[in-house]
Amino acid sequence: MGICDRLGKFFRRTVPLANKLRSYSRQDALGDAIAGLTISLAMIPQSIAYAALANLEPQYGLNSAFAGCLVYVVFGTVKEVVIGPSSLMSLLTLEFTYRLNVDFAILLTFLAGFLQMVIALLKLGVLLGYISTPVISGFTSASSIIIVGSQLKGMLGIQFKSSGFVDSLVGLKKNIHQQRDGDTILGICCLIGLFILKAAKENLAERYSKYPWLKTALVTLGTARNALVVFASSCVAWYYQSNDMTVPFITTRATESGIPLPRIPPLSTTFQNRTLSFTDMIDELGTGPMTVAIVGVLINVAIAKKFADGPVDVQQEIATLSLCNMFGSLFQSIPTSGAFTRSALIGASGVRSTFASLYSAILSLLAIQFLGPHIHLIPRASLSAMLIAAVVVLIDWETPRRVWKRSKIEFLAVVATLLGCLLIRIDLGLLCGVAVGIARLTYKWARPSITVDRVQSDFGMCVVVKPDISLHFPSAEYFSQFLLKEARKEISGTPIIIDCECVVDSDYTVATTLNLLQEIFEKTGHKLVLTNVPPLCKKKWKMGKIRETLISPPGEAFYAAFGKKIDSTENDETFQLIGT
Amino acid sequence: MGICDRLGKFFRRTVPLANKLRSYSRQDALGDAIAGLTISLAMIPQSIAYAALANLEPQYGLNSAFAGCLVYVVFGTVKEVVIGPSSLMSLLTLEFTYRLNVDFAILLTFLAGFLQMVIALLKLGVLLGYISTPVISGFTSASSIIIVGSQLKGMLGIQFKSSGFVDSLVGLKKNIHQQRDGDTILGICCLIGLFILKAAKENLAERYSKYPWLKTALVTLGTARNALVVFASSCVAWYYQSNDMTVPFITTRATESGIPLPRIPPLSTTFQNRTLSFTDMIDELGTGPMTVAIVGVLINVAIAKKFADGPVDVQQEIATLSLCNMFGSLFQSIPTSGAFTRSALIGASGVRSTFASLYSAILSLLAIQFLGPHIHLIPRASLSAMLIAAVVVLIDWETPRRVWKRSKIEFLAVVATLLGCLLIRIDLGLLCGVAVGIARLTYKWARPSITVDRVQSDFGMCVVVKPDISLHFPSAEYFSQFLLKEARKEISGTPIIIDCECVVDSDYTVATTLNLLQEIFEKTGHKLVLTNVPPLCKKKWKMGKIRETLISPPGEAFYAAFGKKIDSTENDETFQLIGT
């Protein structure tokens, strides 16, 4: 294969768009256009809200939608994935930068993207397997609860900075006297409006399928519910303003409008009258970039697998997300990822290829340009209502319920993650869950279940002991005590056979323990024989007292146990048949 | 069984001494007396040195020997164990209290004893199984190296406070100009003397076994080498002093003599002109009590197992060590444990029961009373020489060499422990080693080895896939990708049978992964069948797509795979035979 062919193959693999364009039909173009417009209708107000969640001006959310969609068009592989700001990414951005300025958020985007590239290139994605489904469920629910907690203040018209669940609640209690009726009423109205429109789409539309025009209207209203609520509440603000009255609720901070120009991510910043260098900034961000990178990869891989038709090229998906973030940081983005709700919506809208994202990118750009000057009219309470409506449905009741029925320890992992995220910090909560999972797995090595058979062989009675998994250091002491207890029940001289059929591997600690055991058995007059020992263990165990004679080949354990020579013509019974 | 009988049984179990005294003969008494005297000869100078190692006055070491031996006489079960100060315990005391005063050391003893009681009562001793033999080896070697590093300054006559290996070396380099020739010469002479006397006992004595008096003399000299060296070097100091000359080397700090009176462990202290409360003191000690408790239990259990004739009552041994420390803290002790060297010595001296420890306790008390006024004559350099000679032989070269030959990852655990202890901190080094061990075990769950067989059944070709261990969340993704890859090699419609014979348990993550897999296989037209599923997994896996029909009973997998009804008279082939 020539260098050109190799390059061509590499190009086709890393730029799936090239392949797609070859067979791109008019129908495809129409489908993508409709899907792209639909998703934009939902994503543009979302982007403004997610920026608000991260305590930033709206344009940063729109920039993210633009950059994410643009990169995914070229490098993405799953047509249902729409990259942009998301509730989890914004929450993490808030957690790690709420005391800092926007330069940190943009640097966070870049660093997270960089780490994601490292994950993709070193194929570290496999390590994500250590985060189990119950832990992900606990993490998602905790994030939703934290977001609801953080948005209550917006709904009540209270202003203070907070991060974390406890912090939000304490802040609310302390500042409850600031509560404003205008915001509260508007917020509740928006919330009710959003739920009604959603119900109209999800429940009513089906019922009126006889009237296609009514069904389409209901679905469109439901899909555009965020845009509608934002538009309606902004109109109220505009009405007050144009009549020179005080707007009775807090509106969004004014934003610099205009298309973002590419700029190198901030490598130093001035913050609280101090100039911070690049390393200072990294210090301030702490575990932020790592957490954002890992959570972003987790979400995206899960979405890609859920929606893709066939197997997913995980490396490519992680690398694409990385590029979305690194490219985004040039255009002043906050961290991006896919979102389950967006994928479900674009899938239902009949998307044909990742090309649909191009429309979202362009519309986001237009929104920045033309909505920009009017964004200051959007009431904060309606954004909060939008966020609350978006995340309460993400609280996962189903997984904990199912897990509880199956395994109490796995349920503990959910609870540990949930409480860790809510009470300590969101990244530490994730770690708590992983630790519970690993502790559970490690404990399995510590307590193998051991079957004991008393077998009458041709030469006399002997005890056959069979552990059901490999023997490693956590079980060494337990196994040795178990054998000593079994041996004490038998008269001196009874051979003890360890059947290692289920043992795959072992270690030095077990080797020394078996040696010590053999020393004790020599004193008490029991004979120890190991059989069915896999080659890997033979190498590790052969030392000191564990002599060649103690390790018997399969089928010769009884001969070894009673010190008999094997008559090869007679030995037609294999050891494996003993148990039957 | 009446309450009296129960109490009697409990008493006999917890106070083994009571049982022993019933059949205590004159011969036993003689044996114990000789062993007790022998061990005292070694232990008394050791105690002074170990106190010096912990940067404390000599009486604290002697107090520990007294208290430890006295308690062990009553509650101990293994006659070879001699509780007293030890190099590891003193090193840990130094690490955690070298910036503080002696009150902290005594409180450390009490808290460690208290935690050991918790370990004994809650049966947490089993958790020590997570510390593997290679990790213990690395930890022991690192401790010896740290002790040698900390004692070089004593040999050179330099004075500064240090903890940890790096700290000691940096301190040495900085203060090398203080080096005193008197101390250096004395230290080297002592070291040479100690090694010659040791060699005389270990090598020469055997050679002169024809002359019993010579052999006895050599063994006695060897056994008493520490006492001899201390006595000889003290005589030099006395000679200088009695002739009104300046002693050319540093001697031990003067000590308050007299038998220690019981006193409640210090619950507050005045340190650097600050009064510290009990909680302040606990804060200062940090992870000290936990580390001392765990390491103490580790050593003692290991020694008890090594020297006991039969199985060891581990709970009782841990509880006894706890009492030694708690009781010791009333008599101003530093933390205590057993020591391999002492057990070897007392075993060789013909000990008959734990009663021998009573002689050591009494002799330690006499030493405090009568040696006390002369202790200030003991040169520091000879104590340092004694410590170095005692610990260099503990550096374990054998285990790493053996481990290297067997498993490189286990060798990494040794190296991680060693470097962690030397470069970071001794307790964190231990944690590093444990972490490597747990990571290795967790990785085993992530990559099961999977065998694939293409089997021609009566109904057609099918693929039988068999993982060799239980499926848990770290392997879920790997296993699913593996199956997808295998399926892609086959034509659509080929059934895929997962043989779960080696699977013992599973979890929710695997259940959801299998469900997703089933969804994909339904699209690609492969049929998935699970067979030999253990009941535990059946309960955990049954959800969504994994319907009853997918889980086939053993021996019916082919029928299930091809959707055939079973004719029970024909089905005489069991599934297990397929592989053969």
Image (cartoon, coloured by chain):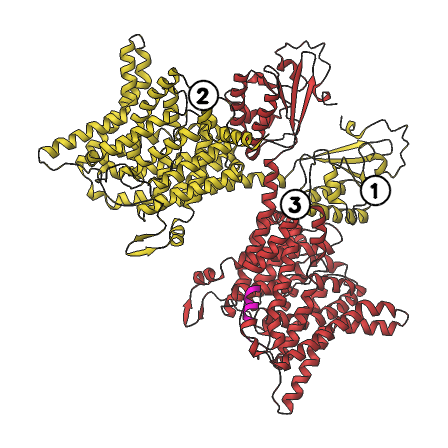
Chain colours: A red, B yellow
- What residue is drawn where x is 40% and y is 53%? B279
- What residue is drawn where x is 44% and y is 42%? B114
Q: Secondary structure at mark 2?
A: helix
Q: In the picture provided, is A136 more to the left or to the right than A174?
A: right
- For the residues bearing labels 3 and 2, Cβ distance under 8 angstroms: no
Label 2 resides on the chain identified as B
Across and down, in percent, residue A578 comes to: 72, 20
- Crowd rating for badge 1 (residues with CA inside 10 Å; few <14, some 14–19, many 20+): few
- Classify the position of the C terminus of chain B by image quarter: top right
Q: CA distance from mark 1 to mark 2?
A: 69 Å
Q: Which residues are magenta?
A: A158-171
Q: Secondary structure at mark 1?
A: helix
Q: CA distance from mark 3 to mark 2?
A: 58 Å
The amino acid sitting under disc 3 is Phe
Label 3 resides on the chain identified as B
- Residue at which label 3 appears: B473
- Residue at which label 2 appears: B22
Q: In the picture provided, is B441 more to the left or to the right than A218?
A: left
Please report whichever mark, 1 or 3, sits nearer to the chain's N-terminal start. 3
- Crowd rating for badge 2 (residues with CA inside 10 Å; few <14, some 14–19, many 20+): few
The amino acid sitting under disc 1 is Thr
Across and down, in percent, residue B528 comes to: 79, 42
**Residue A396 in the image: above or below residue A273:** above
Q: Secondary structure at mark 3?
A: helix
Q: Is residue B164 in sight in this rendering?
A: no
- Residue at which label 1 appears: B549
Front label number (3 vs 2): 2
